[in-house]
Image: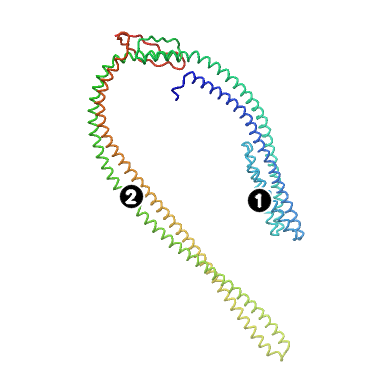
Amino acid sequence: MLERIKVRTAMVAVFACFLAVLMLSGALTWRNAGRSAAEIEGLNQVAVNQVDPLFEASGAALRARVALLEALANLQANHLDPVATLHQQAGAAQRQAATQFQRYVDVPKEPAAAELAATLQTRWRAYQSVLDELAAAVDAGQAEPALAAMNRAQQAEHAFQRDMEAFLARVQAHSDEVRSGAEDTHVVARWSAIALAALGVLLTLAGWLFVRRAVLRPLLEAGHHFDRIADGDLTARIEVRSANEIGALFAALKRMQEGLTRTIAVMRRGVDEINVGAAEISAGNANLSSRTEEQAAALEETAATMEELATTVKQNADNAAQANQLAAVSMQVAQRGGESVAQVVQTMHGISASSRQIADIVTVIDGIAFQTNILALNAAVEAARAGEQGKGFAVVAGEVRSLAQRAAQAAKEIKALIESSVATVRAGSQQVASAGGTMDEVVASVQRVADIMGEISAASAQQASGIDQVSLAISQMDETTQQNAALVEQAAAAATAMEEQARHLAAAAAVFRTQGGAIIDVAAAPLAGPAGGHAALPPAAAH
């Protein structure tokens, strides 16, 4: 379809497209200037949007601190009822502050303010950490730690406020700079678009006039020369009138005419050389056929070797799969051992708890014996006061006191034994826990072994697949070699056909008419470069 378009039409279309593209470029420049201003204004708006979340976060944090301060005052005054409510209010204010500060963090920051923003975030985290400590102290009812945390919170708030003011000042300064630069750029871009559009129109008109005179007319003349050459007439005189690309075209046309004349004269000699070359091609085809057969035999041996290698790799893959299964079984056994150790740990914990309960009971018995001893002592004193009438009661009180002392001594011995048992149980629990950790490490090691064996199995499978692909490629190479052998035979037939074509070529050369059968022996000259000018034409030499 493109071959049917006239050069005039093509040039008009090219210049029209050039003008359209230039106008579109101007329009896009105009539009992009407005968009640039809008985007910069949007960037400025993003910077401004950082202010409100910062103030909201700072205010919410201040409300949280005030609520905690009131709770601390009530705590010091021993008014505990409002403390829980104030603590909840402080928590809600802290959550609101965190939400607002996250809004500030999500807004993109300009590079110049990145360091200030990072410092501000560090201050905020320190401030919130102190508030969390203050809230925890108030919730625990610890007045003195809460008072110390309150002082640190006040200092952290002052530091945060200073950094926030510095950051906001930098954001405002950057916004002013961006707005001023955007306005200047917007004006320059619009006037540049207008100037480019006007210049494009002028250049398009000037280019059309130049192309019409310097390109289209000479192309028509060159077309007439080509028509005469196509009719076999090589006698027309071709003149080179310019030193530009059109002149280079006419110079090339002249060299083509002279070259055709020279080619017609030497064509018969070329036909003889073609015959000699055809004989050499035939001999080369014979040698190529022999080497192709040797290559085919070597490929067959390579294919057999690759099949043996594929069998070996598949066996390795099967062995790796079996090892992977054994590793999985080992991992299950290790896991069951870990579960058994965990059950032993639970049992040891239960024994330790029972021992502690027995120790508590013995402590109670010791207390009862002590109280019984005191009661017996009191009874002995009262019996002494009663005189003869209280002797029998004094004897009983003495026996009770002796029994209470023996019970207390026995309780102490039992307590000592139980404490020793508890220590032994605790040591055993620690050893069992250590054994449990060791079992976990064993399970992890077995898992790693299973993973490695899985990777080995997968790698072996990939190797087997790769060897299959290599075998397929060797088979394809064998087929290609056989096809090459067939092509060698076809080339021999083509050499024979080449001789026949040489005879037809000699007959076709008789169509061209030259000036008195002269042969112009000229060297091919290069085309002129785009900078102008063309190569000098060598003089004609008649033979």
327 horizontally vs 420: left or right: left
- Secondary element at tag 1: helix
Binning the other alpha carbons within 10 Å of mark 2 as few (below 14), some (14 to 19) or many (20 upward) gives: some
Q: Where 502 falls versus 342 (above or below)?
A: above
Between discs 2 and 1, the one toward the N terminus: 1
- Snapshot quadrant of residue 398: bottom right
Mark 2 touches mark 1? (CB < 8 Å): no
* Type of amino acid under label 1: Ser
Q: CA distance from mark 2 to mark 1?
A: 61 Å
Residue topped by disc 2: 313
Which residue is drawn at the image coordinates 46% and 17% (left, top)?
530
Disc 1 target residue: 129
Q: Which mark is residue 382?
A: none
Along the line of sight, the residue nearer the viewer: 270 or 296: 270
Left or right: where 76 falls relative to 530: right
> As rendered, which of 117 and 92 lies closer to the eye?
92
Residue 83 appears in which quarter of the rendering? bottom right
* Label 2 SS: helix
Q: Is residue 67 above or below residue 181?
A: below
